[in-house]
Amino acid sequence: MSIERELNKRSGSKCELCGATENLKVYTVLPTQKGGIDESIFACTTCIDQIENPDNVDLNHWRCLNDSMWNENVAVQVVAWRMLSRMRAAGWPQELLDMMYLDEDTLAWAQATGEGEEDENKLIHRDSNGVILEHGDSVVLIKDLKVKGSSMVAKQGTAVRNIRLDHENAEYIEGKVDGQQIVIITQYVKKI
């Protein structure tokens, strides 16, 4: 059974965040470990657009989190926590966050994107041009790089897809080059 059909069945053909019944699709909650239904939600395009584009957030739309934050599915809880954290300055989202409980692993997953941190504490990964990099972005190498611990050389112009951010150092990202997972310094990449 496909992930979309499983999520459709799990959600009762509704957005797992706001309850909308139209324009639904699978949304993968990053960063993923194994992928699949446990790391995905069924959401409407309105919710997905506002999750991916913080400037488009409509506070009143997200009042639905009052109900969906109690969803039994962990991926839904993670997205609810992230959106409430993003909007907490409005007052009511902070009240909901104060009521919400996430176990240690779920909270770590929710915090993995930096949502909920104060802006001055947030690590911001930037490419060689100063463009902000996010989990799942694609970048291209701007110079040949020798890979430490191997004889491999990652060539200039190589595309690295679905990058992961290092949450301890803003200058490091991870990605696969020629099937090998490597750490890359952000000053040698350009976002595609």
Image (cartoon, grey):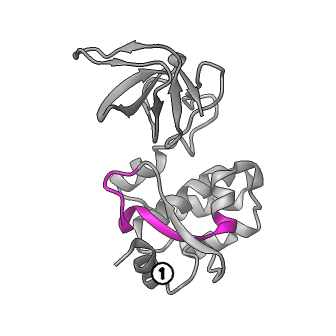
* Residue at (66, 81) in percent of width and height: 22
Q: Between residues 3 and 140, which one lies in front from this camera angle?
A: 140
Seen from the viewer's position, the closer of residues 100 and 133 is: 133
Question: Quadrant of residue 146 in the image?
Answer: top left
Question: Residue shown at 69%/51% (left/top)?
Answer: 53
Q: Position of residue 130 (x, y in %)?
A: 66, 22
Residue 167 location (% of width, % of height): 44, 32
Is residue 158 depicted above or below 144 in this figure? below
Residue 33 belongs to the span the image colors magenta: yes
Which quarter of the rendering shows the C terminus? top right
Residue 100 visible in the snapshot: no
> Do we see residue 112 in this rendering?
yes
Q: Which of 31 and 65 is in front in this view?
A: 31
Q: Nearer the viewer, residue 42 or 121?
A: 42
What's the magenta region?
A: 32-47
Q: For the residue marked with disc 1, what is the amino acid?
A: Asn
> Which residue is rendered at x = 65% and y = 65% of the image?
47
Residue appearing at x 45%, y 37% in the figure: 163
Image location of residue 57, percent across then percent down:
74, 57
| Placement of the N terminus among the 4 image quadrants | bottom left
- Total marks placed: 1
Q: Where does label 1 land, which residue?
A: 8
Above-or-below relation of 42 to 51: below
User: Residue 44's spot in the image, x, y percent?
Assistant: 63, 71
